[in-house]
Image (tube, helix red, strand yellow):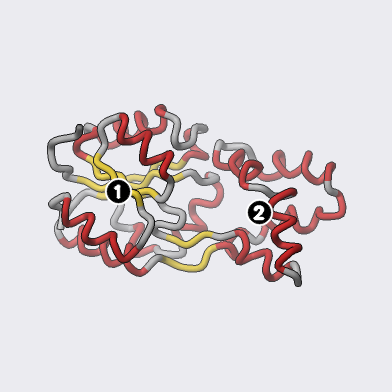
Amino acid sequence: MTAARPRAVLWDVGNVIVRWDPRALYAKIFKEPADIDRFLSSVCTLDWHVEHDKGVAFPDNAAPLIARFPEHEAEIRAWDQRFDEMLSGPVPETAAVIEALADRDVPQFALTNMPQSKWPVVQAIAPRHFGFFRDAIVSGDEKVIKPARRIYEIVLERTGLAPADLLFIDDSAANIDAAMDMGFHTHHFTDPARLRAAVERHGLL
């Protein structure tokens, strides 16, 4: 069990700091919800997208999918070309906590499964808040994704901190479990309204 209090925060990004939902884009492309469901469950699936998070370039990942679904070429390419339309702004409760931590000079870092080419797009959604971060570990750069142990090791190498120094906040139970196994303090982000109290319990606010 991790004993010492953390002294820094390690943030996940998607749906913790910035809202991300492919449906926000494809609701503009398909008229019927059932068509959106069908496309996202059988064509541009999250299993397909995770290859971008691992560092595979969008054109390289799209080519075999377009070969399988040529009738959906435009929609497949939209995943890359209109990625910004999947983003719908910062999570207000998280933004408030980031600012409060910055006011107390608490070191903050990001650890995100994200295509390298889209990181600047995501940062542009909340430039003030990302500006408080001392470093960001982006899976597309590292070619490894959460919950693999290696990406957490990269965090420790880059920050110079020990697991017990960090409070890791993520909306994925698998990512949280992997961090807990390594000795990180953790908060499973499921309700934005519970975030500040969780950070306060760890003595950071």
Q: Is residue 134 visible?
A: no
Q: Is residue 152 above or below residue 190?
A: above
Residue 19 image point, x, y percent? 47, 62
Nearest the camera: 181 or 103?
181
Q: Quadrant of residue 75?
A: bottom right
Along the horizontal axis of the image, is 176 left or right of 1?
Answer: right
Residue ID at (48%, 39%): 139
Q: CA distance from mark 2 to mark 1?
A: 31 Å
The quarter of the image holding the N terminus is: top left
Q: Residue at x 45, y 42 (%)?
A: 138
Q: Amino acid at mark 2?
A: Asp
* First of labels 2, 1 by sequence position: 2
| Secondary element at image label 1 | strand
The residue under the point 84% across, 42% down is 67
Residue 78 can be seen, yes or no: yes
Element at label 2: helix
Give x and y (percent) for residue 86: 58, 62
Q: Label 1, on which residue?
A: 187
Residue type at the position of mark 1: His
In-image side of 62 versus 102 (left or right): right
Q: Residue at x 36, y 54 (%)?
A: 189
The mark lying in front, picked from 2 and 1, is: 1
Vertical arrangement, residue 196 with respect to residue 184, above or below: below
Q: Position of residue 170 (x, y in %)?
A: 38, 48
Q: Which residue is mark 2?
A: 80
Q: Quadrant of residue 192?
A: bottom left
x%, y% of residue 173?
41, 43
Residue closer to the observer: 127 or 6: 6
